[in-house]
Image: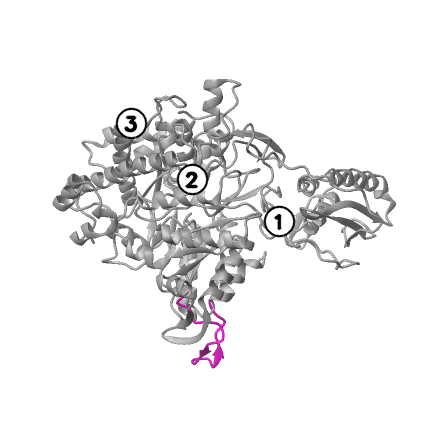
C-alpha cells in the first residue's frame, strides 16, 4: 500500500508535510514517515534506537499503522505543538474567577493543536442566587457561549480548526435547556454536546418513574423520566445532537477506576478522560493487512496483526515522552497513567476483501477476531514494556480484576501479574477521516464506507477550485482485480443503504473488546419513525455501548447531497431537483445593498419556490438607478435565474460570485474586504440561502417573509456536502473537517 498521487498528496501537502523556513523539509511522504519514526525513536535507548526507528518507519511508510494527525504533523518539527489530539480539561469550579481561569487553559490547549472536552455540570443552574454579589447566576449554558466565542477566535488564527465537547449531567437543573440548545442553528457551532446519562436514570426510565433535577444535593424539581428522555431523543432526532454518554458504565469499566473518576470525553467521544486527561491516538489499517483480497483465501494473518500491534504500542508509548503539553497538569496526568488509544481504521474495506458485508454475522465474527488479537497483543506489549522500562507510576495490581483484563488469555495475565503494565489504558477507536484519505481513501475508523465514489472540491491558492474524483480504496482494489465486472451489491454496502441495526451491532461488538470508547455515528434514514429512532439508544445501552451518536437528515442539519452516481447500484445517485414551472405569485426578499463606489443603491430581489426538499431560490433580479450596471446586471440575473431553475445544488453560485475581483479595486465593508460589487451580491445570495450569518451592511428586507433554516452547507466552501461521521463534521467538497 503506497502513497497515491491526487487527493492524498494534496492532503499530505496541506496538513502533514513539514516545510521549514529555510526551504528544507519533507520532499515526499516517505520523508514524513522517516521524520516521525526518528522523532519517536529518540525515546529508545541509544543501542537499539536505529533498529526501532526502522521498524517504526516500515509501519508508517506503508500505511499499515497511521499515527494520529497531530503526531504526523508535529513529530520531529521542533514546533511548539502537542502530539496529543484531544484533552479533557480540569474540573470547572463554580466561581467566576475559576471559570475564566479554565477558559484560559482551554484556549492555551487549543492554540497548541489540542481539542478539548469539558463537563459543565459543576456550574450552578440559571437563576440560582449568588450570595457574594446579590444576583442570580446565569447558568452553565451562558459560560458555554464564552467557550464557543473563544474557539472561534483561537481556531481562526491557526491551521487546525477548534474542536470542543460540552457535557452536562442528566440530573442538572438546566438539562432541558442544554438538550434544546442545538435547535438554535447559530449557537454552540464549535461544540459537540453530550448528555451524561446515569444508570439510575435508565432505571427510572424503565420503571416509568420521576427524575429529580439536583445541584449540590438540593432538588430543584422533578420531572417524569420518560418526558425528559423523549425531549432528549426528539432533539437528537431533529438536530443530530446531543449525543449520549452512559457515564456510570464508563467509570465501571475503566481500567483506572482505582485512581480517577471520568465525567467528560474528548470532542469525538472515543476517549472518556479524567480531569486534565489526554488522548494519544493511532490506528492499525486493517485494509492494508488483508492478503489475497476478494478471493476465498483472503485473510489477515494473526502473526502480522500481533507484530504490528506490539510495534504500535511501543511507538505510542514513546510519544508520551517526546510530546509537549500545553499545561503542566496535562503533562503530569499523561505521565502518571501513560494512557494510549490504539485503534483501527479500514475495517469496512478489510471486511469487503474477506467477503463479509458490514453488519452481517460474518463481519461481526471477523471484527471480533481481529480486535481480540489487537487487545491481547497490546496488553502483552505493555507488560513487556513494563519489564523493560517500568510500570506507569499509578499502576496497581487491582487492575487485574478490572472488566477489560479479566478475560485476557492466561499467559498475558501471568505477564501482567509478573511485570505490571506500562500503560493504564491501551485501546480506543477514533475517527480517522483525513488520515484515511491520506492512506488512499480507506474506509474510516470502524465506520462503513460512506459512499464508494464522490467528487471532492479542492480549493487552490489563487481562490479557484478544481474537482477530484474520490473512489473508496476497496472499490479501487476490486476494479484493479476484476476490471469492468460490476461489484456485488450485497457485499458493497454503504452508509446510504445500511439499517441502523447494522451500525449498532458493529459498535457493540467492538466495544466489548476496547478499553476506552468508540467514535461512531449510527446513520439513520430520514423517514425512520421516532419510536424506531428512540429504540436505538435503549438497545445500545442494553448491548453495552458506552456512548451513542446518531445522524438523521433533518431540517436543521440538512441531508447528504453531492454523492456521485455510485458505481454500486444500491447506493443512491446524486439527486437532481426538478422544479415546477413558475407560478404567478412567489414570495421572497428584496435587499438594499449600498456599494461605496456607486451613488445609488443596488436592490437585489430573490424569489423562492417551495419544493418537497424545502424552500429554495427560483429567480433573482438586480436593479439600480445607476445605468452603468444595466447590461451586466441583466445578464447576471438571467444566468443565475437559469441555474436556480435547473435545480440540484446551487450553493456554488454565491461562491463563484464572491471570487470575482474588480480590477479597479474593491471596498472595505465593516472591516472586511469585498473584492467587487458582484462579490457583494454573492454575499447577499449567501445570506438569503442561510449559508452564513449577515456580515454585509444590508438593510432590512422590503418584504419580510420567513426563510428556510440553514441546511448542511459547508462554512468553508459553501457546498451542500456536509456529512457527520464519527461525531465530526466533514465536507465532501473541500475537505473541511471539524469535531465540534
Q: Secondary structure at mark 2?
A: loop
Give the image location of residue 84, x and y in percent.
36, 46
Q: Judge left or right: residue 594 versus residue 252.
A: right
Q: Does 128 appear in magenta? A: yes
Q: Main secondary structure of the magenta part?
A: loop
Give the image location of residue 703, x and y in percent.
79, 58
The magenta segment: 121-143
Residue 658 visible from this viewpoint:
yes
The Cα atoms of the two marked residues, 3 and 1, are separated by: 45 Å
For the point 43% across and 66% down, the residue is 208
Check disc 2: other Cα within 10 Å, few if <14, some if 14-19, many if 20+: many
Residue closer to the observer: 515 or 457 = 515
The Cα atoms of the two marked residues, 2 and 3, are separated by: 23 Å
Residue closer to the observer: 233 or 521 = 233
Q: Earlier in the sequence, mark 3 or mark 1?
A: 3
Q: Which residue is mark 2?
A: 432
Camera-nearest label, 2 or 3: 3
Q: Judge left or right: residue 495 versus residue 386.
A: right
Q: Which residue is mark 1?
A: 711
**Which label is found at residue 490?**
none
**Which label is found at residue 301?**
3
Label 2 close to label 3 by CB (< 8 Å): no
Residue 26 to residue 583: above or below? above
Amino acid at each position: 500500500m503506497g502513497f497515491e498521487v491526487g487527493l492524498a498528496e494534496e492532503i499530505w501537502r496541506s496538513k502533514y508535510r513539514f516545510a521549514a523556513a529555510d526551504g528544507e523539509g519533507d520532499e515526499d511522504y516517505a520523508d514524513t514517515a522517516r521524520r516521525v519514526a526518528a522523532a519517536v525513536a529518540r525515546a529508545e535507548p541509544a543501542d537499539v534506537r536505529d533498529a526501532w526507528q526502522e521498524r517504526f518507519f516500515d509501519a508508517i511508510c506503508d500505511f499499515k499503522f497511521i499515527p494520529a494527525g497531530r503526531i504526523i504533523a508535529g513529530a520531529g518539527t521542533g514546533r511548539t505543538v502537542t502530539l496529543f489530539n484531544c484533552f479533557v480539561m480540569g474540573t470547572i469550579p463554580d466561581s467566576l474567577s475559576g471559570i475564566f481561569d479554565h477558559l484560559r487553559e482551554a484556549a492555551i490547549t487549543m492554540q497548541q493543536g489540542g481539542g478539548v472536552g469539558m463537563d459543565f455540570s459543576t456550574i450552578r443552574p440559571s437563576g440560582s442566587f449568588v450570595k457574594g454579589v446579590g444576583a442570580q447566576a446565569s447558568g452553565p449554558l451562558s459560560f458555554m457561549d464564552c467557550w464557543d466565542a473563544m474557539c472561534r477566535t483561537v481556531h481562526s488564527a491557526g491551521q487546525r480548526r477548534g474542536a470542543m465537547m460540552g457535557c452536562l449531567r442528566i440530573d442538572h437543573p438546566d438539562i432541558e435547556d442544554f438538550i434544546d440548545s442545538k435547535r438554535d442553528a447559530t449557537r454552540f457551532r464549535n461544540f459537540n454536546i453530550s448528555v451524561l446519562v446515569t444508570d439510575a436514570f435508565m432505571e427510572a426510565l424503565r420503571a416509568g418513574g420521576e427524575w429529580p433535577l439536583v445541584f449540590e444535593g438540593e432538588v430543584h424539581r422533578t420531572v417524569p423520566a420518560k418526558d425528559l428522555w423523549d425531549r432528549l431523543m426528539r432533539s437528537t432526532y431533529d438536530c443530530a445532537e446531543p449525543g449520549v454518554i452512559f457515564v456510570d458504565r464508563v467509570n465501571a469499566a475503566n481500567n483506572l477506576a482505582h485512581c480517577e473518576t471520568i465525567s467528560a470525553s474528548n470532542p469525538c467521544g472515543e476517549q472518556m478522560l479524567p480531569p486534565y486527561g489526554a488522548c494519544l491516538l493511532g490506528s492499525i489499517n486493517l485494509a492494508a493487512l488483508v492478503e489475497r483480497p476478494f478471493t476465498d483465501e483472503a485473510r489477515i494473518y494473526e502473526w502480522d496483526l500481533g507484530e504490528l500491534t506490539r510495534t504500535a504500542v511501543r511507538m505510542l508509548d514513546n510519544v508520551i515522552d517526546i510530546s509537549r503539553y500545553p499545561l503542566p497538569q496535562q503533562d503530569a496526568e499523561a505521565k502518571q497513567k501513560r494512557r494510549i488509544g490504539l485503534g483501527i481504521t479500514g475495517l469496512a474495506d478489510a471486511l469487503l476483501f474477506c467477503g463479509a458485508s458490514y453488519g452481517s454475522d460474518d463481519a461481526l465474527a471477523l471484527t471480533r477476531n481481529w480486535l481480540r488479537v489487537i487487545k491481547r497483543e497490546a496488553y502483552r506489549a505493555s507488560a513487556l514494556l513494563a519489564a523493560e522500562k517500568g510500570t506507569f507510576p499509578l499502576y496497581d495490581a487491582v487492575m487485574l480484576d478490572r472488566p477489560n483484563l479479566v478475560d485476557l488469555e492466561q499467559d498475558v495475565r501471568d505477564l501482567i501479574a509478573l511485570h505490571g503494565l506500562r500503560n493504564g489504558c491501551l485501546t480506543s477507536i477514533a475517527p480517522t477521516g483525513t488520515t484515511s484519505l491520506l492512506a488512499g481513501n480507506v474506509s474510516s475508523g470502524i465506520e462503513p464506507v460512506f459512499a464508494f465514489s464522490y467528487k471532492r472540491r479542492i480549493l487552490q491558492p489563487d481562490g479557484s477550485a478544481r474537482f477530484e474524483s474520490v473512489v473508496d480504496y476497496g472499490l479501487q482494489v476490486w476494479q484493479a482485480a476484476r476490471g469492468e465486472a460490476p461489484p456485488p451489491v450485497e457485499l458493497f454496502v454503504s452508509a446510504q443503504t445500511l439499517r441502523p441495526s447494522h451500525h449498532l451491532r458493529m459498535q457493540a461488538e467492538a466495544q466489548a473488546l476496547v478499553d476506552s470508547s468508540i467514535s461512531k455515528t449510527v446513520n439513520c434514514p430520514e423517514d425512520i419513525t421516532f419510536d424506531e429512532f428512540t429504540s436505538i439508544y435503549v438497545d445500545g445501552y442494553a448491548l453495552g455501548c458506552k456512548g451513542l451518536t446518531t445522524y438523521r437528515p433533518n431540517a436543521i442539519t440538512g441531508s447528504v447531497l453531492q454523492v456521485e452516481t455510485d458505481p454500486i447500484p444500491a447506493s443512491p445517485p446524486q439527486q437532481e431537483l426538478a422544479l415546477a414551472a413558475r407560478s404567478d405569485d412567489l414570495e421572497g426578499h428584496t435587499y438594499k445593498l449600498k456599494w461605496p463606489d456607486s451613488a445609488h443603491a443596488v436592490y437585489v430581489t430573490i424569489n423562492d419556490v417551495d419544493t418537497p426538499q424545502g424552500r429554495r431560490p427560483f429567480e433573482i433580479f438586480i436593479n439600480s438607478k445607476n445605468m452603468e450596471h444595466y447590461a451586466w446586471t441583466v445578464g447576471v440575473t438571467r444566468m443565475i435565474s437559469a441555474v436556480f431553475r435547473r435545480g440540484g445544488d446551487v450553493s456554488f453560485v454565491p461562491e463563484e460570485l464572491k471570487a470575482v475581483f474588480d480590477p479597479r479595486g474593491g471596498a472595505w465593508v465593516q472591516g472586511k474586504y469585498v473584492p467587487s460589487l458582484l462579490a457583494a451580491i454573492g454575499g447577499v445570495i449567501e445570506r438569503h440561502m442561510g449559508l452564513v450569518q449577515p456580515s454585509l451592511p444590508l438593510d432590512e428586507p422590503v418584504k419580510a417573509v420567513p426563510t428556510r433554516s440553514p441546511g448542511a452547507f459547508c462554512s468553508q466552501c459553501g457546498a451542500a456536502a456536509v456529512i457527520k461521521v464519527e461525531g465530526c463534521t466533514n465536507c465532501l467538497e473541500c475537505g473541511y473537517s471539524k469535531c465540534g
